[in-house]
Amino acid sequence: AQTVTQSQPEMSVQEAETVTLSCTYDTSESDYYLFWYKQPPSRQMILVIRQEAYKQQNATENRFSVNFQKAAKSFSLKISDSQLGDAAMYFCAYRIYNNNDMRFGAGTRLTVKP
Amino acid sequence: NAGVTQTPKFQVLKTGQSMTLQCAQDMNHNSMYWYRQDPGMGLRLIYYSASEGTTDKGEVPNGYNVSRLNKREFSLRLESAAPSQTSVYFCASSHILGRAFFGQGTRLTVV
């Protein structure tokens, strides 16, 4: 079974600075999706960014970007110009292409200091 | 847009009681999921359903049963609740190739 590892239980960043959250995964598949979800105190799960494994170009969504290293099975999230509203739990997730089984990492709690 | 709706939002059960968590989605998704979220463990997949009438076990299925009643609804049942099932439960749905949409979660406490 595939596994997703987030090695940073907690991270902290100063407002307006940049922070990178790490994620590694274990798989023997070649076609899959990777996701970063944000969970604020409201408990709502919000999709931040998505990456298809067949795409070499790293996904970007405004201040959020990823560094996808397929050979290394690494999928880190970079948040630029951090804002107070970015404070949340962040989950990395993995899903095999054309398969329903989606797995999550343990999460990283991000604190943003004013 | 309703998206994914879970009920109830909060529930307290006594050990040995049973209950069913309800989930419905209005996005015409084929795939639906039940996860539990525990501190330090992220979201763990309990069961999922690829289509109406089919269900499959995830990582932590013991103590749970599910029913995919139709394309819209996917329920999770605890037949005899245990304190170890105290958790936050999330229902989600997706297209086979897409991202998952989540409900608001159910905080369940078993005493």
Image (cartoon, grey):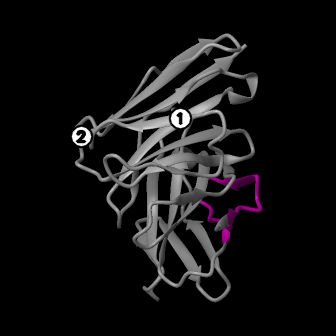
Q: Which quarter of the figure has residue B35?
A: top right
Closer to the chain start, of discs 2 and 1, is: 2
Mark 1 Cα shell of 10 Å, populated few (<14), some (14-19), many (≥20): some
Q: Is residue B93 left or right of residue B21?
A: left
Residue at the extreme front: B53
Q: What is the chain letter for disc 1?
A: B
Placement of A67 over or under B86, stated as above or below: below
Q: Is residue A86 above or below residue A70?
A: above
Label 2: which secondary element: loop
Amino acid under disc 1: Asn
Please say whether residue A111 is visible from this viewpoint: no
**Residue at the spot 72% in from the left edge and 47% down from the top edge:** B41
Quadrant of the frame with the C terminus of chain B: top right
Residue at image point 76% right, 59% down? A8
A7 magenta-colored: yes
Residue that mark 2 sits on:
B26
Q: x%, y% of residue B99?
A: 39, 59
- Within-10-Å neighbours for mark 2: few <14, some 14–19, many 20+: some
Residue placed under numbered mark 1 in the picture:
B65
Which chain does the numbered disc 2 sit on? B
- The answer to whether residue B97 of the structure is visible from this angle is yes
Q: Nearer the viewer, residue B67 or A80?
A: B67
Q: Secondary structure at mark 1?
A: strand
The vertical placement of B29 against A5, above or below, is: above
Q: CA distance from mark 2 to mark 1?
A: 23 Å
Q: Which residues are magenta?
A: A4-25
